[in-house]
Image (cartoon, helix red, strand yellow):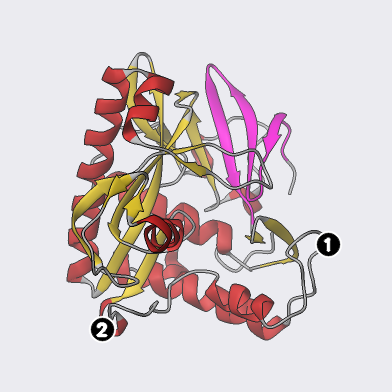
Amino acid sequence: MTIALRHLYSGKVRDMYDAGDDRLLLVTSDRLSAFDVVMAETVPDKGRVLTAMSSFWFHHLGVESHLISTDLADFPEGAQDPDLAGRSMLVHKAEMLTIECVVRGYITGSAWKEYTESGTMHGTPMPTGLLKSSKLPEPVFTPATKAADGEHDINISYAEAEELIGTDLAAQARTISLDLYNRGAALAAERGIIIADTKFELGLVDGELVVADEVLTADSSRYWPADQWEPGSTPPSFDKQPVRDFLETLDWDKTPPPPTLPASVLADTRERYVAGYERITGRDFSDWPGVGLAG
């Protein structure tokens, strides 16, 4: 892949380039992380699945966002490599909020762990008798601090979020996040999928708070098949669960270097991502630009 733009940053999955005129090119790689460690192997087309899913949600929800285009023809000179097709977004540069905007509709993950220890979720007392994966009485905005690469986000209270970004911005972020989650979850439910929780990134573009990065993808959300959900257990998910399941069978301390992943696990993971995209969107992933190219 050849990109003749100034490289700004690389995260666990995404690479960022300066596209000029206060624009960025975000390239979603096929890299895979598990337990905050980047694996040596990649999942074919994973970056395209994530980009395709974000593109679908940006347009379906009609959300104010940083997105300009996912079309290679709209990219600047120096970013016309065919392997960028389908895995890249040209976006407005945004002043990002310093919190993660998490919405939970079901209690699982770190929220479940906290509940079992103290009966609270992000410091707020919760009803007694909840089971793992229980549906919450209503979706809850549960912010977190942004962690450095290789570290975990830290759950915080809404009051702490107000202290970090201000009362007005916190209220806007909560309203936007809950609205997007509720509308996304409603469509997913029609397709037989539960969105258990999700994480949004918000930022300011020309003074307006907009959605940035990815939206309701399998990397930022927990997608569960509705017919396999039962309180008290964790349903399978449309993401990298095959990788996590495999790693849990090993005597590995979850620090670099990562162990080798079998080809079958990588294939199963790709299938999960693609299946989630196709069920949500009703589209054939093979029609998305660039599918099948190396990268």
Which x, y percent locates residue 85?
56, 51
Image point 39% across, 21% down: which residue? 163
Report the front residue among 238 and 22: 238
Which x, y percent locates residue 183?
19, 52
Judge whether residue 12 is colored magenta.
Answer: yes
Judge whether residue 189 is colored magenta.
Answer: no
Which x, y percent locates residue 223?
37, 67
Q: To which quarter of the image does residue 245 belong? A: bottom right
Q: Which mark is drawn over residue 175?
A: none
User: Vertical placement of 158 versus 108: above or below?
Assistant: above
Which x, y percent locates residue 165?
40, 21
Q: Secondary structure at mark 2?
A: helix
Q: Is residue 289 visible?
A: no
Main secondary structure type of the part rendered in magenta? strand
Q: Mark 2 = which residue? A: 227
Q: Is residue 203 left or right of residue 5?
A: left
C-alpha separation, residue under disc 1 versus residue under disc 2: 37 Å
Which comes before the other along the chain, label 1 or label 2?
A: 2
Q: Is residue 88 left or right of residue 57?
A: right
Image point 45% across, 61% down: which residue? 113
Q: Which mark is drawn over residue 257?
A: 1
Q: Residue furthest front?
A: 118
Residues drawn in magenta:
3-29
